[in-house]
Amino acid sequence: MTTLFKNIKELIQVRDKQIDFVAGAEMKILPTIKNAFLVVENGLISDYGKMDDCPNAEFDTVVDATGKMILPSWCDSHTHIVYAGNREGEFVDRINGLSYEDIANNGGGILNSAKKLQETSEDDLYNQSKTRLEEVIQLGTGAVEIKSGYGLTADAELKMLRVIKRLKAAYPIEIKATFLGAHAVPSNYKNNKAGYLKMLIDDVMPKISSENLAEYVDIFCEKGYFSVEDTELILVAGKKHGLTPKIHVNQFNAIGGVQVGVKYNALSVDHLEIMRDEDIAALKNTKTMPVALPSCSYFLSIPYTPARKMIDAGLPLALATDYNPGSTPSGNMNFVISTACIKMKITPEEAINAATINGAYAMGLEQQVGSITKGKLANFILTKPINSYGFIPYSFGNHHIEKVYLKGLEVE
Ligand SMILES: [Zn+2]
C-alpha cells in the first residue's frame, strides 16, 4: 500500500536524522521543505523531498495537497482522558468565586471524579473515554499518554488502566499508560497517607507489572497532596516494577519535586507553573523533559509556566493538554500551541517543536513519531489551505485541519 502526497505547499518538521529532542536556541529552528512531496509505504514515511525530485512511479493513491501543509501529528504527553462524568458544577462554583482548593476541601475535585469512576462499569468507562480519544484524534493528535488517578482504590485504578489497554488495542493512535494512583489521598485513608501509599505499592504495582498495564509511574508532588519523601517512595517502588517516573510538580508550590524527578531520571516533570531559578538549574543538561500545560493555566487562571525563561536558559520544553475533567476539560493541542505563543511568549517554531518532537520524547516515542523522518509512522496532519504554519497558533480557536492520517491511513 503506497500513497503519494504531492504539491505540498510546505512539509513541516523534516528531520533527516533521528533526534531525541531539541533544547534552548535549537527550539527556534523548525526545518521545512517548500513545494514538497511525501511518500507513505505500509504505514511508514518512506520518502520525501522537493517536487522537482518527485518519483515517477505508480502509487496506490495520490493526494494533491496544493495550497496545504503537512506536519507531524501532535504528541500529547500528558492527559487524563479516562474519566467518568464531568465536573461542570464545579466550573460554575469557580465562576462564583470558589478556588480549586476550596472545591477540593468541599469533597469536590479529584475525590469527586474518583467517586463517579468507582461507580462506573469498565465498559461504560471505556465508552466514555473512547469518545474523547476519537475527538482528540480529529484535532490532530497522533500520540497520547493517558494516566490513571481517578480510581484511588486498587480495583478502580486497575479498571482505568485496563480501559487504557483496551484503547491501545482498538485504535491506531500511539498510546502510553501511566499509573497515577498517588493523585490524591482518598477519604478512607484521610489520616493514613502512608497506608494508602503502601497499598499502591504492595497491592497495585505488582498487578500492573504482571498484566503489563503501564509504562510510567506518576505522583502529584504538591503541598496538601504528596511530599517530596512520598514522591521518592513511589518513584523507587515504581522503578522496581519497571515503571519510569513522570511527575506532577510545581503546579502551585515549589517544594523540591523537580530535583527528585531529576534524581530518579524522570522522563518528564510536568506543570511547572511555579519555577525557582534552582529548579531551572536542576533541569539543565539532564534527560528529563519539562512539560508545560498552558490550557490548564488558562482554565484555572493560574500562572503560566515561564517557558520563555526556561528555553532561554537552554532547556527543552514540551507542550501537552492535561485533558481532565477538573482543570482542563479540553484536549485541543491546536489551542495549546496558540496559548503557548500568546501567553508564554514562545514562537510558532518553538511551540511546534514542543508539541511534536519534544512531546514524543516525553512519551518515549521519539523513534516512532514527532517528525517527518524516513521510517517513522505516517501520523500527520494535512491542513486546510493556509498561508504559513504560523497561522495555526495566530488564528487561535479556529480549525485548520482538513484531514488526519494515522499509520498512513486517513481517519474518517
Ligand atoms: Zn495532570
Image (cartoon, helix red, strand yellow):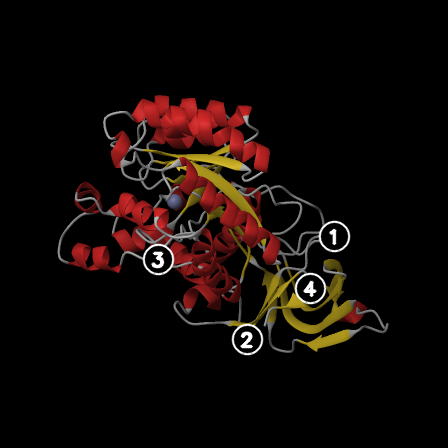
Q: CA distance from mark 4 to mark 1?
A: 12 Å
Task: Identify whether 22 is placed above or below 36.
Answer: above
Sequence-earlier tag: 4 or 1:
1
Q: Secondary structure at mark 1?
A: loop
Q: Nearer the viewer, mark 2 or mark 4?
A: 4
Q: Residue at x 55, y 75 (%)?
A: 384
Residue 314 pos. (x, y %): 48, 37
Q: Secondary structure at mark 3?
A: loop
Q: Quadrant of ligand 1?
A: top left
Q: Secondary structure at mark 2?
A: loop
Mark 1 highlights which residue?
Answer: 375
Task: Identify whether 376 is placed above or below 385.
Answer: above
Residue 34 pos. (x, y %): 66, 67
Q: Amino acid at mark 3?
A: Pro
Task: Identify whether 130 is placed above or below 293.
Answer: below
Image mark for residue 329 = 3
Q: Amino acid at mark 2?
A: Lys
Residue 105 pos. (x, y %): 18, 41
Sequence-earlier tag: 2 or 3:
3
Q: CA distance from mark 2 to mark 4?
A: 18 Å
Cβ–Cβ below 8 Å for labels 2 and 1? no
Task: Give the quarter of the figure containing the N terminus.
Answer: bottom right
Mark 4 highlights which residue?
Answer: 408
Q: Residue at x 58, y 33 (%)?
A: 210
Give the class, few, some or many, for how many residues have Cα within 10 Å of label 2's Cα (few <14, many ≥20): some
Sequence-earlier tag: 1 or 3:
3
Image mark for residue 384 = 2
